[in-house]
Amino acid sequence: MSPIEAGVLVLGVVLGLALFATVMVALASLIRTLGSARKAIDELTSRAIPMLDEAHEVVRLARKDMDKVDTLLTRADSISGTVDSASKLAYSLFSNPAVKALALASGGARAVARLGRNRTGSVRRLGRGRSLRKASAVLAPGADSPS
């Protein structure tokens, strides 16, 4: 082997060793980086899992509360409809008879007041010192004035 071939061989071996050393250093750095990444992922996972469990519990409780609110709103709507129907029924049952009863009482009081006067405008006596005007005032206050 000639000295040039030996020099090329030595240079090849040195370059191969340098390349091998560079690859080994890069591989060691990569292993350290992967180890750090694994630790970071493990730490993140150890923190994230309880947070996710807590968030799941909060969502479950919120859903339960929303169901309660929905039930309350449904009941309130039902009660509102019932009250509305009852008020319409009460109005239709009592408004017409009540108006008729008030009109009858007012007309009756006016009739009693008119019957209590004679043609001259003086008040007739009923006996025992009571007049028809006083009797009509008892039946319908304010109805003793002529209309």
Image: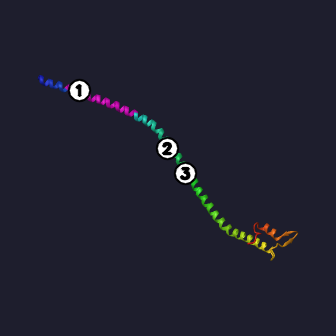
- Furthest residue to the front? 120
Q: Inspect the image, locate mark 1, and give the three-letter code of the amino acid beneath it.
A: Ala
- The foreground one among 83 and 142 is 142
- Left or right, 112 with respect to 52, comes to right
Q: Quadrant location of the N terminus?
A: top left
Q: Inspect the image, locate mark 3, and give the three-letter code of the amino acid beneath it.
A: Asp
Count of numbered badges drawn on the protein: 3
Q: Which mark is residue 18?
A: 1
Q: Which residue is mark 3?
A: 67
Marks 3 and 1 sit apart, C-alpha to C-alpha, by: 71 Å
Badge 1, how many Cα within 10 Å: few under 14, some, many 20+? few
Q: Which residue is mark 2?
A: 56
Q: Inspect the image, locate mark 2, and give the three-letter code of the amino acid beneath it.
A: His
Marks 1 and 2 sit apart, C-alpha to C-alpha, by: 55 Å
Badge 3, how many Cα within 10 Å: few under 14, some, many 20+? few
Q: Is residue 55 above or below residue 143?
A: above
Q: Quadrant of residue 113?
A: bottom right
- Left or right, 126 with respect to 48, comes to right
- Left or right, 35 with respect to 145, comes to left
- For the residues bearing labels 3 and 1, Cβ distance under 8 angstroms: no
Seen at 55% across and 51% down, the residue is 67
Marks 2 and 3 sit apart, C-alpha to C-alpha, by: 17 Å
- The foreground one among 133 and 18 is 133
Badge 2, how many Cα within 10 Å: few under 14, some, many 20+? few
